[in-house]
Image: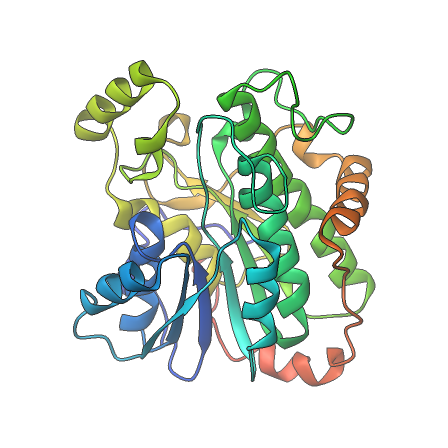
């Protein structure tokens, strides 16, 4: 099984000329760092963002790239927007990076009435992936979090919206656990269908981004601001596990994170996941529930044989 050397970096990304990637939540933080790296390696990158104006401003700051950039509107908290984005897609999509997310926010709802963290971090990406999967030729990478290990983190199947029991960190932990269970079940379905497309997940460790800025707790906002200055790695370093998952030859369902102490920082490497995130029964149950909530399903992989050749355009071989 492939592993990543500690010193693997953005400069080690193989040539991505001719490849197309979609990155959600691409106007700041890990998203724009991922866009920048892929575009400089030659990829055509579509920034899927809620605010097109901010997305265009972010794209304008990516200078000297070999590849091209395009900004398209996508609001993961609105399933109609997800469907519109997917309906407008044409042509092969080598790489879908499900990066966008919200963290520890005050209780709120998506346009469709779902708890915002579960609805955005999981359901929005679940629907987007199912709708775009007929076009995907290589892989789907979903950005998860070490928060899936938070004490008591589980999927509240009897109360996914946490009605009457909402707590910001509980909701975030549930959404990040859902990301890993989604990746596990997606890979199972791809394998069963004979598709060469791979599903992988990655987490950034402790990276200084805007994600923590909307925390429901003023105390946590202060603590994270200090931590961002003193302990966190920058967004470019935080994006390395995502990029490694995106371009290296790794098995489906792999989970990448930093190799440093506590997986807080460092070079990308294969990391473990909690027992709850490894439960195939929970993964299947979550998939079924998510299909019902989003009214999307796993597509028939009618192009499986033709994708075999496309998916081997590469990505680059493992460094091990």
Q: How is the image coloured?
A: rainbow
Q: Is residue 268 left or right of residue 119?
A: left
Q: Is residue 312 left or right of residue 318?
A: right
The location of residue 198, given as percent across then percent down, is 63, 62
**Res 94 visible:** yes
The location of residue 10, given as percent across then percent down, is 29, 59
The location of residue 242, given as percent across then percent down, is 43, 52
Q: Quadrant of residue 306?
A: bottom right
With respect to residue 284, does 47 lie above or below?
A: below
The location of residue 22, given as percent across then percent down, is 46, 67
**Res 272 visible:** no
Q: Quadrant of residue 72?
A: bottom left
Q: Quadrant of residue 192?
A: bottom right
Q: Residue at x 74, y 47 (%)?
A: 293
Q: Residue at x 47, y 71 (%)?
A: 315
166 or 297: which is nearer to us?
Answer: 166
Q: Residue at x 56, y 27 (%)?
A: 171
Q: Is residue 154 left or right of residue 24?
A: right
Q: Residue at x 59, y 34 (%)?
A: 115
User: What is the count of numbered marks?
Assistant: 0
With respect to residue 238, does 8 lie above or below?
A: below
225 or 141: which is nearer to us?
Answer: 225
288 or 113: which is nearer to us?
Answer: 113
With respect to residue 304, does 217 lie above or below?
A: above
């Amino acid at each position: 099984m492939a592993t990543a050397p500690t010193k693997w970096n953005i400069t080690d990304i193989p040539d991505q000329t001719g490849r197309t990637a979609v990155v959600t939540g691409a106007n700041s933080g890990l998203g724009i760092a991922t866009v920048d790296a892929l575009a400089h390696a030659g990829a055509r990158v579509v920034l899927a963002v809620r605010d097109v104006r901010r997305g265009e401003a972010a794209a304008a700051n990516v200078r000297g790239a070999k590849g091209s950039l395009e900004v398209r509107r996508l609001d993961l908290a609105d399933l109609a927007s997800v469907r519109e984005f997917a309906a407008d897609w044409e042509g092969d999509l080598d790489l879908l990076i499900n990066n966008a997310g919200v963290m520890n926010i005050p209780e709120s709802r998506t346009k469709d009435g779902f708890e915002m963290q579960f609805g955005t971090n999981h359901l929005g990406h679940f629907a987007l992936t199912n709708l775009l999967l007929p076009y995907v030729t290589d892989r789907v990478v979903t950005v998860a979090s070490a928060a899936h290990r938070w004490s008591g983190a589980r999927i509240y199947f009897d109360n996914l919206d946490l009605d009457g029991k909402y707590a910001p960190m509980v909701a975030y932990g549930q959404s990040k656990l859902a990301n890993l269970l989604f990746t596990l079940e997606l890979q199972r379905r791809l394998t069963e269908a004979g598709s060469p497309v791979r599903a992988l997940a990655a987490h950034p460790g402790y990276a200084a981004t805007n994600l923590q800025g909307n925390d429901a707790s003023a105390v946590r906002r202060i603590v994270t601001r200090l931590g961002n200055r003193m302990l966190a790695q920058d967004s470019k370093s935080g994006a390395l596990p995502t990029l490694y998952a995106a371009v290296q030859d790794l098995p489906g369902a792999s989970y990448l994170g930093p190799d440093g102490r506590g997986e807080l920082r460092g070079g990308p490497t294969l990391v473990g996941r909690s027992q709850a995130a490894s439960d195939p029964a929970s993964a299947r149950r979550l998939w079924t529930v998510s299909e019902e909530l989003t009214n999307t399903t796993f597509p028939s992989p009618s192009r499986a044989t033709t994708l075999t050749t496309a998916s081997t355009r590469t990505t680059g071989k493992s460094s091990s």
